[in-house]
Image (cartoon, helix red, strand yellow):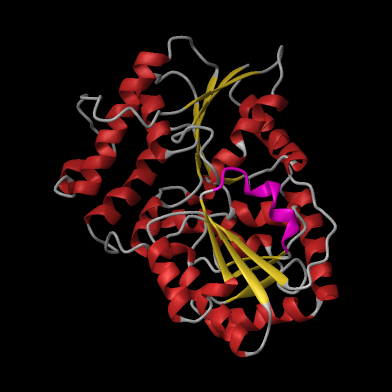
Amino acid sequence: MKLLQALFFPPEQPGGVSSMIPYLQDRFNPPHWEMELFSLPKRIRSKGSDSVQFQTFDWHEFEESPIVQKYVQTYRDYLWWTKLRIKQPYDLIHAHHPIAGLAMKEVFPDIPVVQSIHSSYERELILNGRIQENGLEHRFLTSIYKELEHRTDKLFTVSHSFASYLAPYVGHPEAIGVIPNGFDEKRFKPVPHENEVAQLVTVCRLVPAKGLDILLKACEELKKRGLNYVLHIIGDGPSRLELEELAQQLGIYDETIFYGYTLHPEEFMPFFDIFVLPSRAEAFGSVFAEAALCCLALVGTDVGGISEQIENGTTGLLVPPEDSVALADALEKVIIDPDYRYQLARTGSDKAKTHYSLNRVVHELKQLYLQFK
């Protein structure tokens, strides 16, 4: 069976789907399986010129928005690149971005296309302050979900929480499948260590949706309580300068290290003690599973896919979003009690190995793909 994994970002892009898809190739071996990856290079901009029509709504109602115009132009570019680069037929295409799925079905209407939805672009834009809820962009982007349902052959996502989020925007929410992300355990090697001062780490894009302002305020509270810690922030993004200034204002800049972008954070994540990320929304939250496989204690917010990964008090600690004091309380528990911290890390790691292994994902995907053979 010849398979195409249609990504949006190039495979080397860190985080999310790119943490999983490139590793699938090693598990889909010839002669029974052949798998290739496809994505849109960053250099491809404003190449496509095809007229765009969707079958379930008229996108021109929203075209006065620059964000909508950019989205549609990116769709045109993906169409152009697909027509230019793909000549050989495939038995099935697995798309990992709405633009990829719609473009592939447009170019290859007779090939089955299964569509994974890994995150919510519109929710990210709202949380990051770039669009208004129920505004033009929000209504356009949520209309895409019904278009995907109408045109692709199977729709699924990465958590039950996110499937519930999608339900109001499609005609048959009961048909949405759920396959959580999977991770190659060989990439994650826990390292026995004892840090005299608790080492906190977070790995994410530095944007408002990740709630790092709440984390810094929680760390200010920890310092007021006389607790010693070091906070390592790995990642970059438009909020970096603002977060650095906030750390200075809160008096915790000396306890905080901003690393910027790092390609393979899993290589040194095992040397930390506690992974913390107070996201305001997460469809899945791949970095929690990655941190669990590194045997770190997990502290996260009770939202989306994070809640499905963390069983509060057993595989990690959950706190309400937007609550810096509750976050400080949770962090204090794992800072002052190394035995409890280790217990959470071990149970979290065991769950991640069981529920989020790459082998499990491969098994489920093979069963899905064979339905279209």
Q: Quadrant of the C terminus?
A: top right
Regarding residue 58, the answer to whether it shows in the image is: no
Q: Position of residue 195 (x, y in %)?
A: 78, 68
Q: Position of residue 80 (x, y in %)?
A: 31, 21
Q: From the viewer's perspective, tell me whether residue 272 is left or right of residue 204.
A: right
| Magenta-colored span | 262-272
**Residue at image coords 38%, 68%:** 242
Residue 271 falls inside the magenta stretch: yes
Question: Of all residues shown, which one is farthest toward the front?
Answer: 254
**Residue at image coords 35%, 57%:** 125
Question: Of all residues shown, which one is farthest toward the top?
Answer: 88
Q: From the viewer's perspective, tell me whether residue 322 is left or right of residue 196.
A: left
Along the line of sight, the residue nearer the viewer: 285 or 207: 207
Regarding residue 251, the answer to whether it shows in the image is: yes
Q: From the viewer's perspective, tell me whether residue 209 is left or right of residue 17.
A: left
**Residue at image coords 67%, 75%:** 229
Q: Quadrant of the N terminus?
A: top right
Question: Of all residues shown, which one is farthest toward the left?
Answer: 64
Q: Is residue 68 above or below residue 229?
A: above
Residue 88 falls inside the magenta stretch: no
Q: Is residue 5 above or below residue 281?
A: above
Q: Is residue 144 above or below residue 52?
A: below
Q: Position of residue 69 (x, y in %)?
A: 21, 42
Q: Quadrant of residue 132?
A: bottom left
Along the line of sight, the residue nearer the viewer: 210 or 373: 210
Q: Quadrant of residue 23?
A: top right
Q: Is residue 197 above or below residue 286?
A: below
Q: Position of residue 227 (x, y in %)?
A: 68, 84
Give the total of numbered labels.
Answer: 0
**Residue at image coords 51%, 79%:** 217
Q: From the viewer's perspective, tell me whether residue 110 is left or right of residue 163.
A: left
